[in-house]
Amino acid sequence: MRHLGKLVRLLLLTVNTLFVLLLLLTAYSPYITPTEHPMLSCMGLTFPIFACINGCFLIFWLICCQYKAALLPLAAFLLCYPQLHSLLPLNFGGEQQPEGSIKLLSYNVMGFNGTAKEKSNDNSILNYLKRSGADIICLQEYATANQAGGVTQKEVEKALKAYPYHRINTVGSGQGGHTNQLACYSKYPILTAHTLRYESAYNGSVCYTIRMGKDTLTLINNHLESNKLEKEEKEAYEEMLRDPEKEKVKSNVRQLIHKLSEAAAIRAPQADSIAREVARRGYRHTVVCGDFNDTPISYAHHTIAKGLKDAFTTSGCGPGFSYNKNKFYFRIDNILHTPDLQAHGCKVDRSIGSSDHYPIWCYLSRKSNDE
């Protein structure tokens, strides 16, 4: 680098500065209200790309012994540390259940994979839940069959007989003939269950009050607005990753951004409703979990997580991608909790791929100083 002209160095610094600004914009895009600026609010999806580019610049400056220039991307990373930590936490530790804790599992079961059974006449998702050892199970896109060939409600209850308490709630307005259900299976008594009020045709949130000894736990199970990508659009996205030089890329990108921004604008008031419910509960003994259909760097996650801790960020390790189809490598399933609780060993479990989501689980305990 010492032999490069000042003009080349200045040009590279200018380009690096541009990517630093883009990194900061994407990192703090969750502060942009999707209902007012839907496209800009989706920029958090590109944060990993700009983080990698700035990482390459940092390495380049260090290799070329340009340490002052290296301070530029380094400063950007320091300013974006919370976002980097949320996307790639590195908490190393065991998965053993701490004394006095409970295991909570959240799983979008995709209707038990279309309520299909395998040749062995068993359902892999149902078997997984049965063997999970969880104390409380929250399920999204819950659906059972009324006839042979699918998983029936009676079969679910038989497999999950260790959970004497359960609630199944239909959410959404049901427009277009589509319905969605959220379910909670618990080893502890479920005292109440009610849906939160917000507009959605297919999605929703259910708030449970669960008795645990002399205290109660507020648990909010969620399935927020999906991005409504059709099969063809998902295939087009995969095609772009395989061959970004194709002529259709521009039109596909525009269509994809339109769908994502449209869904983000719908999710925003849903997230607001959940955040209000958590605030109403006084930020005490509350857990929010489920399929947010958005990344940790998004308005939805940022809004819901105000005053809460992200279990995966504080006790998980790695990227934790929870969606497993069409190369959409994002963590969109979450477990959040109030500060009076502590998460241990949070994990996105990739051992089962029967649904389009991986389950996420963690151990939760009361903090020792909580009375």
Image (cartoon, rainbow, N blue to C red):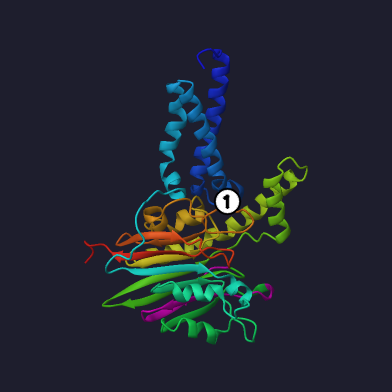
Q: Which residues are magenta?
A: 176-199
Which residue type carries mark 1?
A: Glu
Residue 284's place in the image compared with 111, above or below, is above
Q: Which residue occupies 53% across, 23% down?
A: 13
Measured from the top left, where is residue 38 in percent x and y?
A: 60, 51
Q: Nearer the viewer, residue 244 or 7?
A: 244
Residue 251's place in the image compared with 79, above or below, is below
Task: Indicate the quadrant where residue 97 lies.
Answer: bottom left
Is residue 143 rendered to the left or right of residue 97?
A: right
Q: Which residue occupies 77% across, 46% down?
A: 248
Is residue 243 rendered to the left or right of residue 1?
A: right
Q: Nearer the viewer, residue 294 or 232?
A: 232
Q: Which residue occupies 52% across, 46% down?
A: 29
Q: Which residue occupies 62% across, 70% down?
A: 201
Measured from the top left, where is residue 253 in percent x and y?
A: 69, 47
Q: Which residue is mark 1?
A: 36
Label 1's element?
Answer: loop
Measured from the top left, where is residue 79 in percent x and y?
A: 42, 38
| Residue furthest right in the image | 247
